[in-house]
Image: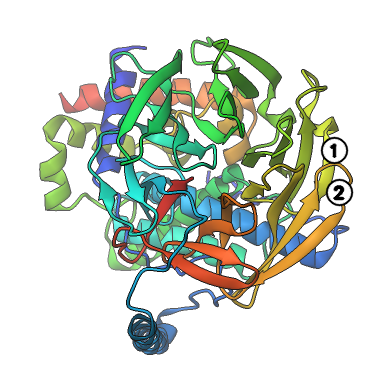
Amino acid sequence: MNTIEERLRETLTARAAIVPDHLPPDLSDLSLPEPPRRGRRLAPVAVAAMIAALIAGIAVVVQQRMADPQPASIPATPPFYVGSVVTDYADVSYGPWEVYATATGARVATTLPQLSHARVAGVGDGRTFFLAGRNTDARHKRTTFYRITLNDRGQASADKIMALPSWEPIESMAAAPDGRSFAFSMKSTQVDCARACASWRELRVWDVVRSRASALYTAPVDKFPPVVGMSWLGDGHTLALSLYERTTLQARALDLSKERTGDLRSSRVVTQSGGSLAGRRGAAAFVVVTSRTEGRTLLGEFSAKTGKRLRELTVGGWFDPIGYDAKGKALLGATRTGLARLDGSRLTPIRTPPLKAGQRLVAAW
Amino acid sequence: MEAEVLRPKERISGSPATAWKASAEVELGRLYRDHRLSLVRLAVLLLGDQEAAEDVVQDVFARLYGGRAPEEISLAYVRTCVLNGSRSLLRRRKMVSRSMERDGGARAESAEVSTLLGEERREMLTALGRLPRRQRETLVLRYYLDLSDAEISQVMRIREGTVRSTVARALARLQKELEGNA
């Protein structure tokens, strides 16, 4: 690369970086059915509505706090979670990563590897996690994977598992229930190309014990749709994937004991819904959001083997499943204001660090 | 001559409307959460000021969310929309400026931004601003977003060969502009 290209790249990056990471959240969350901004004449009405909603929201929060001043007792929920506060409702974190106590939301004084553009996946026991993201050494750019193990007090030990040769973005990640493997999808771009560059997407499984990977699927991005959600199911050998293919989200099931290579799109379609997935413990079943309407979230639990819908759950609010609790009955997930536990249709908030408007917590158990 | 405004592909009918809408909204939400900041930054590089950039990106998402979402909602598609929105705004500025006899291109950087950038970068941005629109856009997509020829071709809806030749011409012209300033 010659000087002018380097200067241009550096200048553009510097100019863009002046735009702060914390943009004002002036557009309502797109997951909520609110009307788009139509013009300046509607601005006073919108402001009045926002103020009214804010007052109503404060009243509801005050009422809830008065009714239940103590944190909810959550015995079956794993004791700790790993999380990172992100702004602008992003789902990829630029760090820092912290360990939090599930019961109190308090940050545990321990140190985790600090990575950018990072993803985290938990085994589900609240003690074992996989964390992957870009290191902070600009001279030796690596996407690095760590296994995080927490002791009874939440103190972390981090084992570096492996590193990719550059800053390949990890799009999704899932941990095997036994903690011996994890799966991830990544996008890589051939950078040293003279004329034409190509982007590839891969799905890999990494065996932590044997320290080796199997590339299940590798294909150009136009033949390998983005994986927007991934969960390793409780039977130990089925990977549920949420693929965004052309116009639709699809939840698919991949039998890792049989499928080793091939076309990902030939895997079994379980349902025409997608997004975040949560695999049930001990079973080849998972929960996925089937629709969001009028402030409600509808979840469906599906059998990965038969595609049969096993049950439906309706949540009065925004909810994104992350995983099941230790007993495999309640769902743990993210809400617009933090984290929550879903028993049947009852949503119990899980304590988090204080979050400002536009922030959310990316977390895993 | 001004090139045609990019027109993202029309929506293809055939899939069930509700499922289509739900999946489009989920995808839009994901794109918004993951990419709003980078889209605003892209628009800033095309327009020169953050306020306008935020407006353009907001309008794009609002229009897509308002029921006119295309069959293929993707990051490339939203980037195309942001490019279109930025072009429209620049065109409007030009029309207004003609009547007021002012320069109607990308706005000059504010004093605060200029100070933060420093002299060399300011020169580079000024030279970039003098390039024809397509060349400027191609360079921003290549050197800010690190898009490949194929990806730029997808966003700008031009052929890959055109991308390559435009980048080469743009770099040569940028070099001349900078030498002219020296």
Q: Nearer the viewer, mark 1 or mark 2?
A: 2
Residue A205 left/right relative to A98: right
Q: Is residue B127 visible?
A: no
What is the three-letter code of the residue carrying label 1?
Arg
Q: Secondary structure at mark 1?
A: strand
Q: Is residue B169 above or below residue B1?
A: above
A70 and A106: which one is in front? A70
Q: Are marks 1 and 2 on the same chain?
A: yes
- Judging from the image, mark 1 belongs to the subunit labelled A
Name the image quarter holding residue B86. bottom left
Label drawn at residue A268: 1
Q: Is residue A318 above or below residue A116?
A: below
| Left or right: residue A99 compared with residue B154 | left
Give the distance between the C-alpha atoms of the residues marked 1 and 2, in whole angstroms.
9 Å
Q: Which residue is mark 2?
A: A307
Tell me where residue A246 appears, x and y as whole percent: 74, 44
Q: Measuring 32% from the left and 78% from the top, which residue is drawn there?
A: A69
Disc on res. A363:
none
User: Chain for mark 2?
Assistant: A
- Tell me which amino acid carries mark 2: Gly
